[in-house]
Amino acid sequence: MTRSAVFLDRDGVINRTFIRDGTPHPPVSLRDLEILPHVPEALSALKAQGYSLVVVTNQPDVGAGKMARPAVEGIHAHLLKELPIDAVKVCYHVEADSCSCRKPRPGMLLEAAREFKIDLVRSSLVGDRWRDVGAAQAAGCRAYFIDWGYAETKPDQPYVAVESLPEAVALILRYDQR
């Protein structure tokens, strides 16, 4: 039996990003981590309806030597402890590595689907960058896009534009196609 999931980008969806020159940057330590408003309640609402919750995050600063892997893993351990998340899938590669896991490629979603018996067609992804939407589209999921107005490429349609994770969750629960 397969189940539905909501895949979540981390930075800009679950936690606040740090904007420099119009582009988002992740927190560099647990001390800098700030969960966005109403995220815990939104995730709890999804869990109450039986969704698997899987964070899928590119963290290329580790691969580029700008951030230590233990710092990223500490942030993820904290999120797993504090939020009703089932798993965190991470790509530490930089673009030049041409890996299958770095969004917009669907590798992390496909891995989670195999591991947790997730039906991708009945699942959604919430992200704040074109790469997130591209990964959802490549995996066959519905995409919800939080547009923070970053100075970067916008995603290609189709996606549902939302202002926050709680708004995406309300729509997912309202139009649940399970």
Image: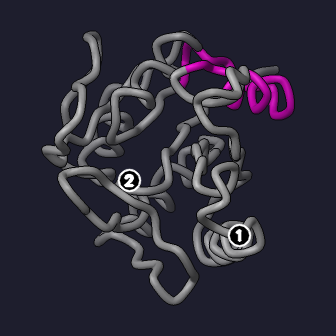
Residue farthest along the bottom direction in this orientation: 31
Q: Nearer the viewer, residue 49 or 84?
A: 84
Residue found 55% across the figure and 38% down from its top: 7
Q: Is residue 160 left or right of residue 107?
A: left
Q: Which residue is mark 1?
A: 68
**Callout 1: SS:** loop
| Residue 120 horizontal/vertical position (percent) | 62, 17
Tag shown at residue 119: none
Question: How many marks overall?
Answer: 2
Residue 110 in magenta stretch:
yes
What is the magenta segment's predominant secondary structure? helix
Three-letter amino acid code at the position of disc 2: Val
Q: Which residues are magenta?
A: 105-123
Badge 2 density bin: few <14, some 14–19, many ≥20, Cα 10 Å? many
- Quarter of the image for residue 67 reads bottom right
Q: Residue at x 63, y 73 (%)?
A: 75
Question: What number is the disc on residue 13?
Answer: 2
What residue do we see at 71% from left, 70% from top?
A: 68
Along the horizontal axis of the image, is 137 left or right of 109? left
Q: Say which residue appears at 64% left-offset and 45% top-offset.
A: 54
Q: Which amino acid type is marked by label 1?
A: Ala
Q: Position of residue 142 (x, y in %)?
A: 42, 19
Quarter location, residue 83: bottom right
- Please provide percent x and percent y for residue 146: 25, 42
Q: CA distance from mark 1 to mark 2?
A: 22 Å
* Residue projecting furthest to the right: 115
